[in-house]
Amino acid sequence: MKIAILPGDGIGTEIVAEAVKVLQVLDLKFETETALVGGAAYEAHGHPLPESTLKLAKESDAILFGAVGDWKYDKLDRPLRPEQAILGLRKNLGLFANFRPAICYPQLVDASSLKRELVSGLDILIIRELTGDIYFGQPRGRRVSPDGHFPGAEEAFDTMRYSRPEIERIAHVAFQAARKRGKRVTSVDKANVLETFQLWKDVVTEIGTQYPDVALDHMYVDNAAMQLVKAPKKFDVVVTGNMFGDILSDAAAMLTGSIGMLPSASLNDKNQGLYEPSHGSAPDIAGKGVANPLATILSAAMMLRFSLNQPEAAARIEKAVDAVLTQGLRTPDIYSEGTTKVGTAQMGDAVVKALG
Ligand code: NAD
Ligand code: IPM
Ligand code: MN
């Protein structure tokens, strides 16, 4: 078994280092290989996703990814921007199913921006379709407007698009995941306005008939955003498209205390997976040693469970994270009164120690 380690940019390198420490003490017999990705790869090789990095990712059983991006690359042509690396990995490896579990640890109820009774016991799973939607639809571009309100003006356009098989396969993923937990799926769409999401709703409803033991309901995305901060515990599994899933999962992150707590797994139909925190490269805190590494460490646990067939090792990591939170250790993003503030490396070291 081989793991590709792609730290990327900003806090990516800091948090992946902690996850690697944790994997190392588990003494699992995996080969690992590290490569540049994102802005770091652009600096070294002139491209955010060099051929060699893509090749390594393709031939690995799992990828541990940090984050990519920095404001300083915002002016580059789009194909050269760091974000194209993660999009390219998802597309090239067919990683269509993105799991973003939002769990509020009891120790962190006071770190959440919501009242404790709203988030206490929260355990929801956002399943985001990851290789379709307006992220990848063609055509897209800029032009002189041929019509519309301002003919002759500069305009930009993207294409929102889903095919039936793309919706079918993510719906199956969601229903199967729900079977293993609360047996409820909420499909989030915008079928009242968008043709793409009317098809989404129709197809999810059809697939739902194959899962009579799972309760299905539908919600418009605007209402879903509201319900997520009003009564998040009413959700079990949420399945939605690429863009809505991106937005809703960042909102759900705050229910757990911080986006630094939200891991993710992106899987293809061969159970090959890319594992990364749901957050980005956080240029505002990069290099300061204060980023929360727990989302990345928990992503490594998901990697052991989903792609490397090591559920016991995964559970050990999750228990160790629970233990350091019980000890009261907190990076600044999850700090609350009466707890102990620590940095990125101290948090990683504490997890290592808790592993025994
Ligand atoms: P971000 O997620 O990087 O940061 C948002 C806020 O959350 C910042 O205030 C940041 O300090 C904080 N934060 C994020 N992770 C944290 C952690 N582990 N611990 C403590 N605080 C944390 O989002 P952004 O600022 O909108 O984007 C920054 C860059 O990251 C952009 O270039 C963006 O495109 C990129 N990005 C990359 C990925 C990815 O690689 N998958 C994901 C999201 C954003
Ligand atoms: C994420 C990020 C990415 C996305 C960006 C960096 C391309 O926000 O992983 O959530 O939009 O999918
Ligand atoms: Mn995002």
Image (cartoon, grey):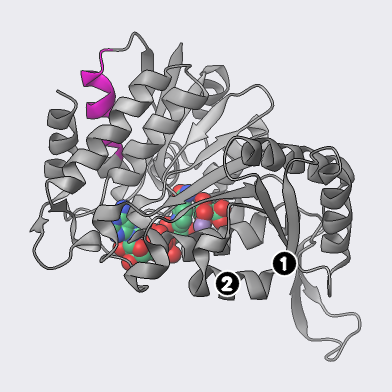
Residue furthest out toward the front? 213
Which residue is at 12% across, 68% downward?
337
**In the displayed structure image, the side of residue 175 where residue 22 appears, left or right:** left
Residue at image location 13% in from the left, 35% down from the top: 349
Q: Give yes or no for contact between labels 1 and 2 (Cβ–Cβ under 8 Å).
A: yes
Mark 1 residue type = Met
Q: Where does residue 273 sit, x and y in percent of width and height? A: 54, 29
Quadrant in the rendering for residue 346: top left
Q: Of helix, strand and loop, which one carries label 1?
A: strand
- Seen in the picture, residue 306 relative to 240 is either above or below; the reply is above
Q: Which residue is mark 1?
A: 219
Q: How many marks?
A: 2
First to last magenta residue range: 16-27
Left/right of residue 243 with respect to residue 27 in the rendered view: right
Residue 282 makes an appearance in the image: no
Find residue 64 and report its horizontal and vertical position in percent. 42, 32
Q: Residue 4 in the image: state x and y as whole percent.
A: 43, 24
Horizontal placement of 110 versus 326: left or right?
right
Who comes first in sequence, dot 1 or dot 2?
1
Q: Nearer the viewer, residue 6 or 263?
A: 263
Res. 67 in view: yes
Q: Amino acid at mark 2?
A: Gln
Query: Within the magenta stretch, is there residue 21?
Result: yes
Q: Which residue is mark 2?
A: 227
Inspect the magenta stretch and tell me whether residue 164 lies in it: no
Question: Position of 131 compared to 90: left or right?
Answer: right
Q: Residues within 10 Å of mark 2 (few under 14, many from 20)?
A: some
